[in-house]
Amino acid sequence: MTNQDTWPELPGYTDDILNEVFSHFQQRLNADLEGVETEDGREHLRIKWLGRKSGLLKQINDTYVQKTPPEFKKNVGHRFNAFRQSVEFELDPRKISKRTGIAVETLEQLGGGQSKKVVEKSVIDITLPGIRPTLGMEHPLIRTMQEIVRVFEHMGYSVGVGPEVETDYYNFEALNFPPDHPARDTQDTLVVARQEHKPLRDRLLLRTHTSPVQIRTMERQPPPVRIVIPGKVHRNDAADATHSPIFHQVEGLCVDENITFSDLKGTLDHAMKELFGSSVRTRFFPSFFPFTEPSADVQISCIFCGGKGCRKCKHSGWIELLGCGMVNPAVFEFVRGKQPAYDPKKISGFAFGMGVDRIAMMKYGISDIGLLYSGDMRFLEQFA
Ligand code: DAH
């Protein structure tokens, strides 16, 4: 068999015929290998058998494999591949190693004459150290948010979400922030550009708090409601150690018959004890939010000094943590058009909202909020 060989036609495609033909190829290869003694000779053989344009393998492929009728192709192709691997193993082991990732030296050590199957089986080195996959983990913010949500789930609350790009109506108007009301100034808002042609209530903005989901929830379902809403919010605040233009809140809403301020106090006191430990105390201060009346700020006894006074609580013994209040009847009036059951004469409710970032920072002793958004693995890996 030379490069000028003409190739006889196959008399058929039975197993016997194919076995004979391919064993004939193998014998030719063996004979060629026996006669080679120098590196040059080996290179010559490599080109003779594996040459891309007119190597014998290419010729065998062109003459037999390519021209085989489809119903026999599998049988012929299978034998051709085995033979090709045998040629490559003898003359160009690097080709096999590239495909299998098995070291060339190992292949060569195992020597010629062995079938490819044996080679593959025996070259897995079980003494090598394994590759340890790095495990993912929850971001400390998400973890904190889930912890808060879980506390309320245990009290029977369900969990809801709402859009981050919100309309002026849901973010402000329906929460009883009238247009131009000064209470809007407490939430420096990022608005979507070129909306001036729309009525104010339809203009889009990035929600400044999770409270709009209170309205969306009540519009969708009649009372009773017990829901918590975790989510991301945005404000046009300059970033510093305690401010970030993106942060997270967990909102809560409970509406039913006969819900009172005592229910609000009991619920939040229990939640704070669950989150920070049973020795934590809470106290409520009068505050103002347009969508609650009365409104309150909740403080917890300092988790660092137990209330004695330290640098963390500015020597007051207390840390302010969330806003809350009884749902303002004016808010119920906004949803009544869609859900008449929100009749403020028949039902009442409370709401609360807390910043997740501050809680995460307190829990994990993080001094700069920016770290939570930096994506710096050196920081994040500490929480794995
Ligand atoms: N949405 C308020 C804020 O971002 C927080 C808040 C206060 C939510 C009182 C409430 C609430 O639901 O009742 O400042």
Image (spheres, rainbow, N blue to C red):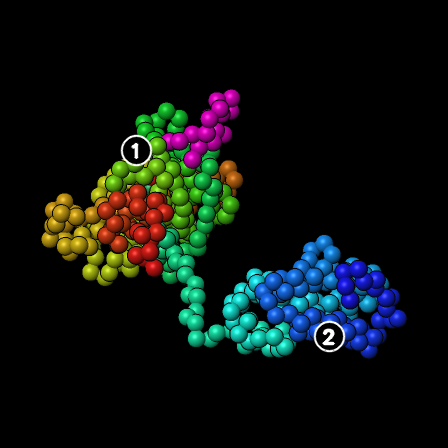
Q: Which quadrant would the C terminus be assigned to in this image?
A: bottom left
Which quarter of the picture shows residue 127? bottom left
Q: Is residue 148 magenta?
A: no
Work out whether residue 107 or residue 252 is closer to the camera in this orientation and state it. Answer: 107
From the viewer's side, name the closer residue of 81 and 169.
Answer: 81
Quadrant housing the N terminus: bottom right
Residue at 29 percent of width and 39 percent of height: 243
Q: Quadrant of ligand 1?
A: top left
Q: Relative to 292, say whether 127 is above or below.
A: below
Q: Earlier in the sequence, mark 2 or mark 1?
A: 2
Q: Is residue 77 among what the camera can see?
A: yes
**Camera-nearest residue between 351 and 359:** 359
Type of amino acid under label 1: Ala
Residue interval drawn in magenta: 189-206
The image shows residue 2 at horizontal and vertical percentages of: 77, 63
Residue 207 in the image: above or below residue 258: above
Q: Which residue is mark 1?
A: 238
The residues tagged by marks 2 and 1 sit, at their Cα atoms, a distance apart of 80 Å
Up the image or down, 134 lies above or below 232; here it is: below
- Across and down, in percent, residue 321 comes to 26, 47
